[in-house]
Image (tube, helix red, strand yellow):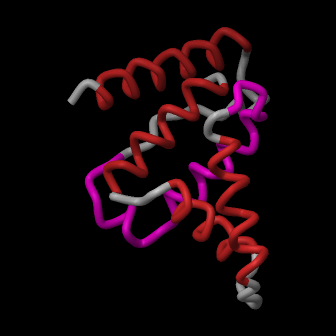
């Protein structure tokens, strides 16, 4: 998945969770800093996530990390949602890797159309 697709996937999932982009920023901060509640830093994360979800230049790796944080959250686990994204393993042939990526994209498109 490219940047735009990942951004759209994240936006769709947080909408289903009834989270704002700021909420995602707070959850991302909490996941990164279990021990610290710095209100100024939390606000920075909130703004950073909002920008990351709108910029075309955001690295897909960061957006994948956001998806990982979302998928590990209890609220997400209680919902009937899947995140169909294939991460390249490097141990399979390029043809199989491409095929698995395509299958994940098809499943994602089917899930989004529901």
Identify whether 59 is placed above or below 75: above
Q: What stretch is highlighted in magenta?
A: 55-81
Q: Nearer the viewer, residue 41 or 33?
A: 41
Expressed as whole percent of the image width and height from the top left, the position of residue 22 reads 55, 61
Residue 77: x %, y % from top left:
37, 64
Q: Quadrant of the C terminus?
A: top left
Q: Which residue sits at x=37%, y=21%? A: 109
Q: Within the image, what quadrant is residue 110 found in?
A: top left
Q: Position of residue 89 (x, y in %)?
A: 72, 34
Q: Does the magenta stretch include residue 61?
A: yes
User: Considering only vertical position in the picture, is 22 above or below 83?
Assistant: below
Q: Residue at image x 33%, y 58%?
A: 18
Query: Residue 30's x, y, as percent?
Result: 65, 76
Can you say whether 72 is above or below 101 in the image? below
35 or 105, which is in the foreground? 35
Furthest toward the top, the residue is 95
Q: Residue at x 40, y 28 (%)?
A: 108
Q: Residue at x 55, y 13 (%)?
A: 99
């Amino acid at each position: 998945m490219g940047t735009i697709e990942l951004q759209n996937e994240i936006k769709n999932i947080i909408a289903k969770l009834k989270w704002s982009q700021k909420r995602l920023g707070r959850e991302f901060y909490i996941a990164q800093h279990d021990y610290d509640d710095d209100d100024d830093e939390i606000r920075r994360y909130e703004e950073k996530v909002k920008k990351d979800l709108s910029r075309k230049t955001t690295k897909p790796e960061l957006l994948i990390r956001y998806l990982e944080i979302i998928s590990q959250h209890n609220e997400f686990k209680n919902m009937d949602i899947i995140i169909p994204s294939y991460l390249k393993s490097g141990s399979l042939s390029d043809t199989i890797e491409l095929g698995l990526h395509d299958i994940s994209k098809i499943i994602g498109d089917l899930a989004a159309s529901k």
